[in-house]
Amino acid sequence: MPNAADILIDTLIEWDVKVIFGLPGDGINGVMEALRKRQDQIRFIQVRHEESAAFMASAYAKFTGNLGVCLATSGPGGTNLLTGLYDAKLDQMPVLAITGTQYHDLIETFTQQDVDLTRLFDNVALYNAHVSDASHMENVASLACRSALSRRGVAHLSIANDVQEMDGKSRSKRNRPKHVPNRYFHGRQVPEEIELDRAARILNDARKVAILAGRGVVGAAEELREIADLLAAPVAKALLGKTALADDDPLTTGGIGILGTAPSQEIMEQCDAVLIVGSSFPYIEYYPRPEAARGVQIDSDPQRIGLRFPVDAGLVGDARETLRLLRPRLTRKTDRSFLEKAQTAMSEWRRVADSGQNTELAARHIDLRTTNQFAVSGALASMASGLPYAIAAGAADPKRPIYAVIGDGGFGMQLGEFSTAVRMALPLKLLVICNGMLNQIAWEQMMFLGNPQFACELAPIDFAKAAEAMGGRGFTIRRFDQIEPTLTEAFSVAGPVVIQAMVDQYEPMMPPKMPKDYAKSFRQALPETPGHRAIEANVSRSPLREMMDAGEQEKELSENTTDLPGIP
């Protein structure tokens, strides 16, 4: 007769789970044995740190749309999952976390690793259960999978190590065997007709429509392009929606926010209507002013409609399906000037080599197509997620090449996982931006609060040597003329590669337009910031000088440039 661990793994197999990320431990020995016996049906990927396992489960769900699963032992194993699980929760990814506990009759007796993980996970998990026996497992394992997928979030099962080995002989009379179907039931969700008509009126009446596209519309590029073309509406993309349209598509102005472009900011400032599609982009200051524009939002989750902007029409439904229903109600705009102006501005932006670090560099400078897959830690915006995400991409599709851009701060946190990529022989090319600084934090200290940079310097690590020590290949770029030959050699390597690029730590990370309060804080922080003379020299040159002076603040900043050392 199967025990609780057998029932758990068999249930996951029925739910079409192919991969589990985790780290063995005595609190999950029963589950590990069940996995060992089913290696031909489900793959266990051993990681170096449980936080990585949770990040990988979240990323796997992002890349595949399927359930991501992570496994950790009792006590510290389970607590280590939390950061990656919050990544899944905040980005609405279906993830199942499985944790062990100590013996069921020693819980709450101060025994070793006696941590109540169900209580600990109560905030992160939308379904959270402590499994009592094998008969209970038959029900809750299926419900956990269904809950994570249907409500798009984290489910958690906690199982005492001795319960894992219990069989299902004991069963209540109401708990009939096999009464739970192990499959997911999909449905069609579409907006109400009255809301579609209201949305069409708003968009047809507007003269200057801007579109904000997020992850929810990725995969519906054809429908998004058709609507944007009809409305002569430039499309700004939240970071998770980077592949909603190709970066070189003439209808898009690229990213939005501090990592975005000036044209994206300008269309939001100038539009009289905004269409938000599949996005909960959190930075409200980059949306249109509510009194200046009307809003339409498309989202599969009604809770998220109106979350950032007081929309006049809310369309609850799948993005592709909803755009198709909206299309016949829209009238093609003959005045294309708003779109054309944005296209001209975008062409000019692309001629300016702007600056930034890590995520900003990837967001602004790596042009992707709709056939590419792209993922970051979105709403959680966690460091140390890049390498686990890359490994998850390799687990999802081992044949596709994998590229990751990470900072030296984040890579240092999860350096050991490079050995996981080596063991898996992934075709991974990892570009490490090495500036010896927690650079985004440094500029946030200066621009947000006007405080001099403090405690952001990093001790050096030779990541190329570390890669070689773990069985991979490592390369270093120190000069501009080394870029092409080094990348050519690195990309010819079949397995995992680290390319560390040594960059200027005094290059500021600028928003596309420097807000007035940021500029004031920046000036205030400079004199006492280490390396301020080098920063001043960088800011005095193009394109940073233009970014400081951009937008509505250009006149005020130009009148006060004498306050900023190094800018004549």
Image: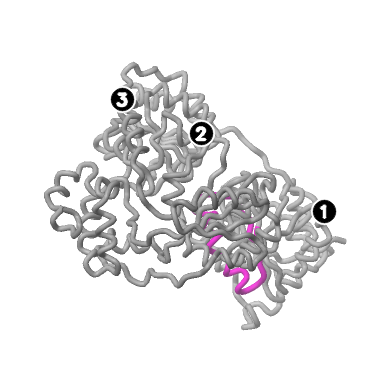
Pick the front one: 90 or 383? 383
Tell me which corner region of the image, top left, top right, bottom left or bottom right, holds residue 546.
top left
Pointer 2 local density, CA inside 10 Å: few below 14, some 14–19, many at least 20: many
* In the image: residue 38, left or right of residue 496: right
Res 388 visible: yes
Q: Is residue 397 above or below residue 202?
A: below
Q: Nearer the viewer, residue 368 or 118?
A: 368
Task: Please tell me whether mark 3 sits on a helix, a strand or a loop.
Answer: loop
Among the 4 quarters of the image, the one containing residue 353: top left
The vertical placement of 211 against 179, above or below, is: above
Residue 376: percent from left, percent from top: 51, 51
- Report whether 524 appears left or right of 155: left
Report the label total. Answer: 3
Which one is closest to the eye, mark 1 or mark 3? 1
Q: Which residues are magenta?
A: 70-97
Instruction: Name the residue that disc number 2 marks.
Output: 319
Give the secondary structure at mark 2: helix
Kind of residue indicated by mark 2: Ala
Residue shown at 41% from the left, 64% from the top: 438
Q: Amino acid at mark 1?
A: Asp
Quote the CA–CA distance across marks 2 and 3: 21 Å
Q: Residue at x 65, y 77 (%)?
A: 107
Disc on res. 206: 3
- Looking at the figure, which quarter contains the N terminus? bottom right
Tag 3: amino acid: Ala
Q: CB of mark 1 within 8 Å of CB of mark 2? A: no
Q: Which mark is residue 40?
A: 1
Q: Residue at x 46, y 59 (%)?
A: 478
Residue 86 on the magenta segment? yes
The image's colour scheme reads: one colour
